Image (spheres, grey):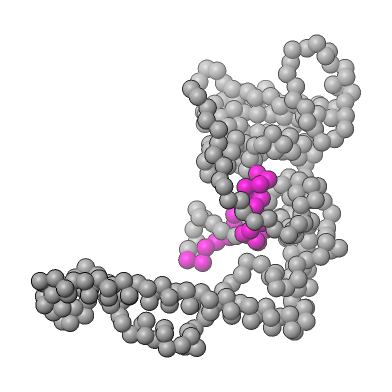
Amino acid sequence: MEMRPRKKLKEKPPAPDLPFPIFQIPQKDRRYLLYDITTVTWLRRTHNILGVLIGSLPQSPQQNIFLGLPLELQAEEARLLVERGLAFVVDDLKSHENALRSPPTQLSKYKADLRKEGFATAKAVEKQKYQKSQEVLQRLSLRQSTPDADKAAGNVSINGREDGQDESLFDVSRPRNSRQGSTSLVPYSSTPTTSYPPLAPPSTNSSLPLPEANPSSYALFTHLHSLGYFLSPGLRFGCQFSVYPGDPLRYHSHFLAVSAEWDEEIDLLDIVGGGRLGTGVKKGWLIGGVETKSESQGRDESSTQQTVSGGSDEGTKPRVFCIEWGGM
């Protein structure tokens, strides 16, 4: 079977101002959030960072199938972005409190920009309604030139609308009102996901330390990420990471990844159960750890056992093993 190369989209999402802030929720279990849709899209397309959407939709606040902003990052994802110099971590509560202490002129400009955006949205909606009404009137004028013009005109004058059409399409008063002036327009309310711009973004001087992540899981994450894989939380399949060869919107995951320390004792039943679980869901159960330099030097170099190098720390390299259950 011939493998075709992946099709790449021509248009790339705009890059945010670097470094961008990652907001840390001040709780015992630290959580890292992104509120800007531009940053979220750019990270997904450019750096294979997925995260998890946790925001509820205003129309359906009680469902949890389709979620929106903010995007919660895994600790491994946040640490990777900070180490690469793409982002910095700030305290979410303190950063917004500092932004609200901005000068009154800056806050008034912020409100004026929101009102201007609301007026632009209202004008676009009114223009769309006007164009829709003009198209309907044009179709009516063409029908009146046919032999059945009297019948068509009678239907419109008596019923106020044509059969099978919406009454709002024939409301001629709406385009007239929209052309009388834009002062009668009511601006649409806008709820931005970020407080900047026009408020000043958080300063890098207020950045927090690196996000804490388990060393073994972070080493496995960075190794698979460097190979071009997408990694999402694997709680659904009883693992640490679900590993995708491409964007999860286009591909199924190939591996269920679990990290372990190099000298950690692993129960054989866990290996058998992981292999059966992966094979049952048509995936490979992948376990990985970081081999220290002393261990790798003591190992015979002529061994046919395959190793995969690429660790970020000098003197260490991650090694991964994929286990599949052959009897299922």
Instruction: Say which residue appears at 57% left-offset and 42% top-offset.
Output: 8
Q: In this view, does 133 lie to the left or right of 52?
A: left
Q: Is residue 311 above or below residue 56?
A: above
Out of 113 and 178, give the one closest to the viewer. 178
Instruction: Say which residue appears at 60% left-offset and 35% top-offset.
Output: 245
Residue 135 inside the magenta-drawn segment: no
Q: Is residue 175 above or below residue 269?
A: below
Residue 317 point in image, percent of width and height = 81, 29
Out of 193 and 210, give the one closest to the viewer. 193
Q: How many marks?
A: 0
Out of 268 and 104, give the one closest to the viewer. 104
Q: In which quarter of the image is residue 92?
A: bottom right
Residue 156 point in image, percent of width and height = 18, 78
Q: In which quarter of the image is residue 178?
A: bottom left
- The region drawn magenta spans 34-59
Q: Quadrant of residue 90?
A: bottom right
Residue 109 point in image, percent of width and height = 69, 81
Q: Residue 264, can we see it? A: no
Q: Residue 136, can we see it? A: yes
Q: Is residue 245 left or right of residue 159?
A: right
Residue 42 inside the magenta-drawn segment: yes
Q: In this view, does 210 lie to the left or right of 72?
A: right
Q: Is residue 111 left or right of residue 128?
A: right
Residue 162 point in image, percent of width and height = 20, 73
Instruction: Say which residue appears at 60% left-offset and 56% top-offset.
Output: 54
